[in-house]
Amino acid sequence: MTASAGDEEPNFLEMVRINLDRAAKFMNMDPAVLELVKTADATLTMTIPLKRDSGHIEYYKAYRVQNSRHKTPTKGGTRYASDASLEEVQALALLMTLKCACVNLPFGGGKGAVKVDPKTLSEGELERLTRRYALELAKKGFLDPSMDCPGPDMGTGEREMAWMMDTYRFHNPENLYAQASTTGKPLSCGGISGRTESTGLGLYYCLREFMNDSEYMNRVNLTTGMKDKTFIVQGFGNVGYWASHFIEGDGGKVVGVLERDGAVYNPNGISAEDLKKYMIKRGTLKGFPRAEYFEDIEEVFKKPCDVIIPAARERSITGKNAVNFNCKIVAEGANGPTTPRGEDVLTAKNVLVLPDLLLNAGGVTVSYFEYVKNLGFIKPGFMTRRLESKTNQWIIDSVTKGNNEITDENIKNILEGPSEVNLVYSGLEDVMCQATEETKATSKELGVSLRVAVFINAIRKINSATLGGSVGH
């Protein structure tokens, strides 16, 4: 199935629906349920007034979409971008519904956006805009710990999530769980350790599972493991940087980084930490001393590498530029970075495409950990299973094989128990690895691509929850 008849690529929302249709061909399900998933349950469009520091009043378009309330609350980020649109928010909310189902989280999918470039506003203006946005959401049932729980996204972060939560709590003092109205907050406001790096870390866990699997690596003529493999990363924000950080820690080598204003390439490797420090100081890749700079980012996409990680915006890999890729694996860190036509081209070139629905689910997974922390409940073993298994194996090896030196520090760590960040990493690893195995199993069972497999798994779970719930009653 091609994306469309002509040369034009589908828009973002059409892309997600095309992938849903591709997956539905392999399933026996009620078409009405599929249409229900494709269509948002609730959409809020509004105009927010903002009094600028100058005293001038400006108005900003804002959105919040609840794609599916088959499980509540709905969950999804809040994006501040000058090119935000309702179509984009609808697509992202739909992806969130599928993503939460993919990794077995008890959330429906949602998404929000304000059409603004946050760099054009002062901190005070941003706070006023964010608090007004939060107030309007709360008044209409789109901000509530039991109904809709926003998190950070492009252009927002801990600060904005704290403002939104505080606004909700101020207007709802009777709600004992008001702190759970947003996630991605600072630790001082009920946040959780490890949230910042969670999406990049989740991507690393999934990519590691595939690269340690000889069956998949044989398909693309690679040896197993990340050690000495080369990576090109598009987008060096939160996801791109942290994915690079963990990949480097496992012996991988980042040789190229692409941003909007250009790209850098060094076949001998680029230090993620050095590049991050340079970008914080200069605000650009240009001039980075230990790599060649390219104005045209497509030139770096053409460079040879083992893995390309698109971690920027949607629709960055198309049928037009995918023909020039010289890699073995595409590991999607962004939402919807590859168009259906782009994936068809990559598949024809025997490139293994690891889908966004699975690989970038780390952020919402750790948001779930934060959410249940704020509620004061998490089921036993959910975040500790993998950590306990590793600790027990270490103890067994120490006793039976003498492989590990038992120091006072080791004993202290075992007796004191894990820190919060250790628990978060353990829980995230467990969730991502389980979802990866589910995806592999469905792909093998039905003989379909990994993207089709991950969509099938998500739709099956949504279908089961929808038909097993109160629809029609």
Image (cartoon, grey):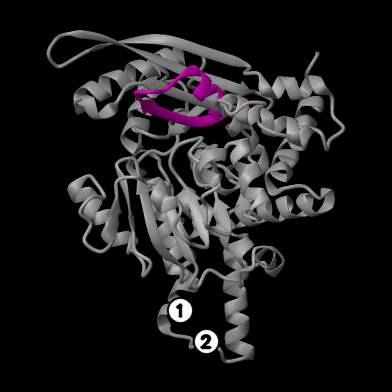
Disc 2 crowd rating (10 Å Cα; few below 14, some 14-19, many 20+) is few
Report the disc number at residue 240.
none
Q: Where is residue 18 in the image (x, y as percent from the top left)?
A: 68, 30
Judge left or right: residue 456 versus residue 89: right
Residue 235 position (above or below residue 173): below
Q: Position of residue 65 (x, y in %)?
A: 54, 20
Q: In the image, what residue occupies the spot 54% across and 47% down?
A: 332
Image quadrant where residue 23 sits: top right
Q: Earlier in the sequence, mark 1 or mark 2?
A: 2
Q: Where is residue 425 in the image (x, y as percent from the top left)?
A: 50, 57
The residue lying furthest to the left in this view is: 54
Q: In the image, what residue occupies the spot 74% across and 42% down?
A: 457
Question: Per the image, is 74 magenta?
Answer: yes
Report the disc number at residue 404.
2
> Alpha carbon of mark 1 to alpha carbon of mark 2: how far?
10 Å
- Kindly identify which residue carries mark 1: 410
Judge left or right: residue 104 versus residue 66: right
Front-lying residue, 211 or 104 = 211
Residue 197 position (above or below residue 117): below
Is residue 83 shown to the viewer in this render?
A: yes
Q: In the image, what residue occupies the spot 62% across and 37% down?
A: 341
Q: Which contiguous range is marked in magenta?
A: 72-93
Q: Do the residues labelled 1 and 2 touch (CB within 8 Å)?
A: yes
Secondary structure of the residue carrying tag 1 is helix
Image quadrant where residue 92 sits: top right
Instruction: Name the quadrant of the N terminus.
Output: top right
Q: Position of residue 375 (x, y in %)?
A: 52, 37
Q: Which of marks 1 and 2 is in front?
A: 2
